[in-house]
Image (cartoon, rainbow, N blue to C red):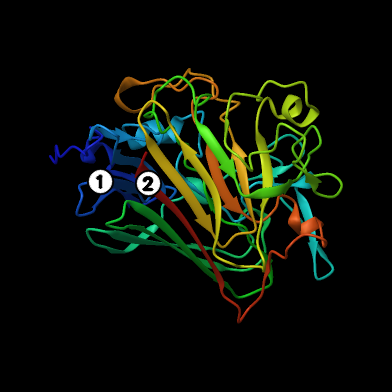
Amino acid sequence: MNNELTLSSVCVESFRKAINGKETALYILKNRTGSELTVTNYGAKIVSLTVPDRTGKWTDVVTGHDSIDDYLTSEEPYFGAICGRYANRIANARFTLDGTMYKLAANNGPNSLHGGITGFNAVVWEVKRVDDRSIELTYLSIDGEEGFPGTLATTVTYTLTDDDEVIIDYHATTDKPTVLNLTNHSYFNLSGAGDPSVGNHQLILNADYYLPTDETSIPLGPPEKVEGTPMDFRTAHEVGERINADFKPLVIGRGYDHTFIINKKEAGEWAFAARCSSPKTGIVMDVFTTEPGVQLYTGNWMTGNLTGKSGRRYPRQSALCFETQHFPDSPNRPDYPGVVLRPGEAFESRTAYKFSIE
């Protein structure tokens, strides 16, 4: 038996399992400074991300579980996962493409969320290549899976650089026209996973506009300016400073759960999206992406009921997500950046989370 432990004290052996005839495992990436990223091929999930704080103490900054069995039964199925085929929501679980209507599973009220009942977060990916600093995972989604058209071949590559940067590269092709929106759904707490709140985290978002939503979290109307609202993070604010304000979008979402439109000169530009830091640890995370938006989610539906890594619990708003992606419900919104992928085209996207100390 392999009793090897990760830097975050997760046992490698506890991730070995056969699911639908496919083997799962835990893979460890390390850089020259000793920082560590661990990934399981179940859902292509980031299980732990351990970086030094201002005193040099190793700190795991993402929520997760100690075993594959816990992931299979978790009330938070998206911890660290790749979400697809369509990350975020599609209104009324349907869309029309080239004159044909496609019906999806309604797994979030009336809407489809993160790819449906069995999205990319809940399948076993093939590991095509792994070395000390990177891992390449692939998944072939067959035509009609979860209601989406086309057989889609997706590759996700995680790289841990010597500059304490986690780079996620996405690539996908299809044999029929389809819609696609991919993201990573890591839940971050820069004070350390299991710290009870991210309310004291300082946050900057490079966004002049956000998308207000209806009661089911579907965008409504045009983008609105953040100026003069609790959505304005163009200069640093504590995450918890205005999270309980009497402001309709925050009341509906029970906190932040909104797409912010990243300020860019042109579509697909590599751009700064966000900066987040913990006063407790001094850990800073900068987010960069080619995607047009970032969904800020402050763990508003976390309950603290589940047991996470090292026996820690994750109460409400004890983590936050920066889901770089296209906009929710884009297949039904021709005014949004396009999400249609056609044969002969390749979907390419990159996001980076860079860690430092202040």
Q: Nearer the viewer, mark 2 or mark 1?
A: 2
Among the 4 quarters of the image, the one containing residue 174: bottom right
Evaluate whether residue 119 shows in this view. no
User: Which residue shows up at 61% across the image and 67% down it?
Assistant: 268
Query: Horizontal placement of 152 versus 228: left or right?
Result: left
Identify the amino acid type marked 1. Ser
Evaluate whether residue 49 shows in this view. yes
Would you place residue 198 above or below residue 105 in this image? above
Q: Which mark is residue 295?
A: none
Identify the amino acid type marked 2. Phe
Dot 2, crowdedness within 10 Å: few (<14), some or many (≥20)?
Answer: many
Between 299 and 76, the residue placed more toward the observer is 299
Query: x, y (%) of residue 14?
Result: 26, 36
Q: Which mark is residue 355?
A: 2
Residue extending farthest right: 221
Query: Horizontal placement of 243 versus 163: left or right?
Result: right
Query: Horizontal placement of 189 versus 227: left or right?
Result: left
Query: x, y (%) of residue 162?
Result: 27, 57
Nearer the N terminus, badge 2 or badge 1?
1
- According to the picture, the residue beneath numbered tag 1 turns out to be 35
Among the 4 quarters of the image, the one containing residue 67: top left
Between 223 and 65, the residue placed more toward the observer is 223
Dot 1, crowdedness within 10 Å: few (<14), some or many (≥20)?
Answer: many
- Contact (CB < 8 A) between labels 2 and 1? yes
Would you place residue 304 above or below residue 5 in this image? above
User: Which residue shows up at 30% across the image and 60% down it?
Assistant: 134
Q: Quadrant of the C terminus?
A: top left
Query: x, y (%) of residue 55?
Result: 24, 31
| Cα–Cα span, label 2 and label 1 | 10 Å
Secondary-structure class at tag 2: strand
User: Which residue shows up at 81% across the image and 36% down it?
Assistant: 214
Residue extending farthest bottom: 344
